[in-house]
Image (spheres, grey):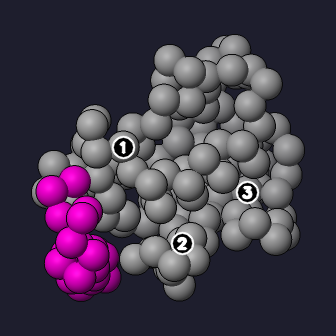
C-alpha cells in the first residue's frame, strides 16, 4: 500500500485517519469523456489477506456508469478473478479511471447506463440527474 497524495495522473489515495486498512481515494474524470471535470471519491478496504486478495473498492460519490451499481460497487476483473498481489493502489485507481472512459458493456451492473452509453448526450443527462439526486437528498 503506497500513499498517493499528489499524483499528476488525476488520482489520490491515503489512509482514513489512524485506520491503515481503510483508505480514501479520489479519481478525476478522464479528459474528453462525459466524466471530464468530475471528481469521484472512493473507499478502499484492505482485508486480512491483502495483498493476496484484492481490496474492496467502492465509489463513495455517486457514479452513473455501466460497471458501477447505485451503491458504488465496481465490476472490474482486477478486483476479482484477475487480481494479482503485484498490483498497487495506483494501478487499481488508474484502472478504475480507465474504466470510466471505456466501460465493459458485456457485464454491466447498471443496465440503463449500459444502454445509453453509445448516446453521449442522453447518457450525460442521466448522469447529471443521478448525481444531482444525491445532492438533493443530502
Residue 29: numbered disc: 2
Disc 1 on helix, strand or loop? loop
Q: CA distance from mark 3 to mark 2?
A: 15 Å
Q: Is residue 11 visible?
A: yes
Q: x, y percentage for residue 56?
A: 53, 34
**Total count of labels:** 3
In the rendered structure, the answer to whether residue 53 lies left or right of residue 134 reads right
Q: Is residue 11 above or below residue 36?
A: above
Residue nearest the viewer, comparing 44 with 114: 114
The numbered disc on residue 104 is 1
Secondary structure under the numbered disc 3 in the rendered image: strand
Q: Which residues are magenta?
A: 114-138
Q: Which mark is residue 13?
A: 3
The residue furthest front is 118
Which comes sooner in the sequence, label 2 or label 1?
2
x, y percent for residue 53: 62, 18
Marks 2 and 1, Cα distance to the nearest angstrom? 17 Å
Whole-percent x, y for residue 71 in the image? 30, 51
Badge number at residue 128: none
Amino acid at each position: 500500500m503506497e500513499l498517493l497524495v499528489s499524483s499528476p495522473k488525476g488520482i489520490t489515495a491515503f489512509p482514513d485517519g489512524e485506520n491503515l486498512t481503510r483508505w480514501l481515494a479520489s479519481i478525476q474524470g478522464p479528459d474528453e469523456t462525459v466524466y471530464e471535470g468530475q471528481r469521484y471519491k472512493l473507499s478502499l478496504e484492505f482485508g486480512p489477506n491483502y495483498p493476496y486478495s484484492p481490496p474492496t473498492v467502492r465509489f463513495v460519490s455517486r457514479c452513473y456508469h455501466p460497471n458501477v451499481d447505485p451503491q458504488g460497487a465496481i465490476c472490474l476483473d482486477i478486483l476479482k478473478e484477475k487480481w494479482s498481489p503485484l498490483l498497487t493502489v495506483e494501478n487499481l485507481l488508474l484502472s478504475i479511471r480507465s474504466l470510466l472512459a471505456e466501460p465493459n458493456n458485456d457485464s454491466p451492473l447498471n443496465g440503463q447506463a449500459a444502454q445509453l452509453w453509445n448516446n453521449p448526450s442522453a447518457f450525460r443527462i442521466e448522469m447529471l440527474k443521478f448525481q444531482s439526486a444525491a445532492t438533493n437528498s443530502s
